[in-house]
Image: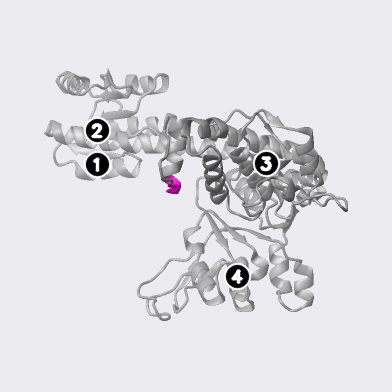
């Protein structure tokens, strides 16, 4: 029996019973109403996934029932059942919000097809609503980590302007969480259900960035074999996040200024003027005031961007927050990996506080992930973090006392994992049971890793 419920509102007993029986045999729960008022009352009191409404009923007709349903349950899909030749009335129903209509006499297979299409539409809406709730929860102002006053100040101001359409400029070093704050602004705004489009302005050369932002027409340049929609068009009614905006060229700055002032632009190689409704959030790690002095950034564009400015301090200025960040990342990563790591040793915490974190929060997250991969016990120690902390003269730096010299300090996490697993396998003479125990994983996981990384060794023991 399906958990999906269908309401049938029809004044003809035979039609009501036939449809109720049909959908009941398909596994759906059904309810019936013999007139409009009783049907509207059932909608208000119960939970239904679809309503089938006869258009021509005495007293309260189908259009009036539809309007009442949309008033109390706007998300409930409604299929109108019309008499033959009533197409013009059915079109009126579609304008009022009906999902579809079906004309009598109809084939039951046709009725099933239309109903299931409407139910799928409802399911997708429900899933999107759930995902939107998840996004709002994940990108919420109550998820702020740490007590640094500058961070608190930035997020308080962000909360105050989130629901506005004001342009926001986020300042801070790489890795401090500028994109997270931009997404929070979007998902806590009235545009949350609309597109969030990110553009890394420093990743593309000038000619490609202009096309990326504003689109291009076919033949606008070599290899422009078709019209392309730009990021501003894609972000219409939503938010565009221009990351590293301090790196854009003067010509792109000019076009961007026009978009901010007039909400208009033309595609590259085109003459049609396009108008967009887009909220702009920009971010940079550059000193824009100095860039203006050096004639590298337009002051009028800066003033347009600088309506609301939020500054996120680097992690080295947030020493008291490092432990909270580290514990948060540890909880998430341990949950994903299944390892039984309880926390950090006092020495590891001290080393993290002493480190300057040039990559900021992003680097800290990577360090914790790397430490989880390398830790075989229940406590992360300094040797698992592999940080370069300045040591006193004559004392080794943390990276040199690890016993992991064969792993470069700047190695990607995937390479660290592969090299560490290979190192343990060699140390255990490729005894998979012993290696798995040492790594803190089961043999099946180890075998999967061996296949994933294509690790090979002659006479591998599987005992």
Mark 4 and mark 3 in contact? Answer it, CB < 8 Å. no
* Residue at (70, 42) in percent of width and height: 383
Question: Which numbered tag is attached to residue 125?
Answer: none
Q: Which residues are magenta?
A: 452-456
Q: Which residue is mark 4?
A: 256
Dominant secondary structure (helix, strand or loop) of the stretch shown in magenta:
loop
Residue 148 appears in view: no
Helix, strand or loop at mark 2: loop
Q: Is residue 455 magenta?
A: yes
Which label lies toward us, 4 or 2? Answer: 4
Mark 2 and mark 1 in contact? Answer it, CB < 8 Å. yes
Q: Is residue 301 magenta?
A: no
Helix, strand or loop at mark 1: helix
Q: Which residue is mark 3?
A: 384
Label 4 CA crowd tier, 10 Å (few <14, some 14–19, many 20+):
many
Quarter of the image that includes the C terminus = top left
Q: Which residue is mark 2?
A: 55
3D distance between C-alphas at marks 2 and 3: 70 Å
Helix, strand or loop at mark 3: helix
3D distance between C-alphas at marks 4 and 1: 48 Å
Helix, strand or loop at mark 4: helix
Residue 96 appears in view: yes
* Residue at (30, 40) in percent of width and height: 93
Q: Which residue is mark 1?
A: 89
Q: Can you give x and y, in whole percent of width and height, for residue 68 in the image? A: 39, 30
Which label lies toward us, 4 or 3? Answer: 3
Q: Nearer the viewer, residue 267 or 446?
A: 446
Label 1 CA crowd tier, 10 Å (few <14, some 14–19, many 20+):
some
Give whichever of discs 4 and 2 has the lower sequence position.
2
Q: Can you give x and y, in whole percent of width and height, for residue 131 in the image? A: 48, 38
Label 2 CA crowd tier, 10 Å (few <14, some 14–19, many 20+):
many
Which label lies toward us, 4 or 1? Answer: 4
């Amino acid at each position: 029996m399906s958990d999906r419920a269908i309401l049938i509102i029809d004044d003809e007993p035979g039609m009501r019973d036939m449809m109720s029986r049909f959908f009941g045999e398909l596994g759906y729960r059904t309810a019936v109403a013999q007139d409009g008022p009783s049907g509207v009352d059932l909608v208000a009191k119960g939970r239904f996934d679809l309503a089938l409404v006869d258009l021509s009923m005495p007293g309260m007709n189908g259009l009036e029932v539809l309007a009442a349903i949309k008033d109390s349950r706007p998300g409930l899909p409604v299929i109108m059942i019309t008499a033959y030749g009533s197409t013009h009335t059915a079109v009126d129903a579609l304008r009022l919000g009906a999902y579809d209509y079906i004309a009598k006499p109809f084939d039951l297979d046709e009725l099933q097809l239309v109903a299931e299409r409407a139910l799928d539409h409802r399911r997708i809406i429900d899933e999107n609503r759930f995902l939107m709730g998840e996004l709002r929860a994940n990108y919420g102002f109550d998820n702020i980590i740490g007590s640094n006053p500058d961070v608190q100040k930035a997020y308080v101001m962000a909360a105050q302007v989130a629901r506005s359409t004001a342009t926001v400029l986020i300042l801070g070093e790489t890795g401090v969480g500028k994109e997270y704050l931009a997404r929070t602004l979007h998902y806590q705004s009235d545009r949350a259900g609309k597109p969030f489009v990110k553009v890394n302005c420093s990743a593309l050369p000038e000619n490609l960035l202009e096309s990326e932002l504003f689109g291009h027409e076919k033949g606008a340049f070599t290899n422009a074999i078709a019209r392309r929609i730009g990021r501003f068009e894609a972000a219409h009614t939503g938010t565009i996040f221009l990351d590293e905006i301090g790196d854009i060229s003067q010509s792109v700055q000019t076009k961007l200024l026009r978009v901010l002032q007039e909400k208009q632009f033309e595609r590259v190689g085109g003459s049609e003027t396009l108008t967009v409704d887009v909220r702009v959030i920009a971010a940079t790690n550059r000193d824009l005031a100095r860039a203006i002095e050096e004639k590298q950034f337009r002051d009028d564009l800066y003033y347009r961007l600088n309506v609301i400015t939020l500054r996120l301090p680097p992690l080295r200025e947030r020493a008291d927050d490092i432990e909270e960040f580290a514990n948060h990342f540890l909880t998430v990563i341990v949950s994903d990996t299944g390892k039984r790591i309880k926390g950090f040793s006092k020495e590891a915490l001290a080393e993290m506080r002493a480190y300057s974190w040039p990559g900021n929060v992003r680097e800290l997250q990577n360090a914790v992930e790397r430490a989880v991969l390398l830790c075989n016990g229940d406590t992360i120690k300094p040797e698992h973090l592999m940080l370069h902390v300045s040591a006193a003269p004559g004392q080794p730096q943390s990276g040199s006392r690890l016993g992991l010299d064969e792993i470069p300090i700047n190695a990607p996490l995937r390479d660290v994992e592969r090299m560490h697993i290979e190192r343990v396998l060699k140390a255990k003479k490729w005894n998979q049971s012993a290696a798995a125990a040492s790594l803190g994983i089961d043999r099946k996981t180890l075998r999967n890793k061996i296949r994933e990384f294509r690790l090979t060794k002659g006479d591998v023991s599987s005992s």
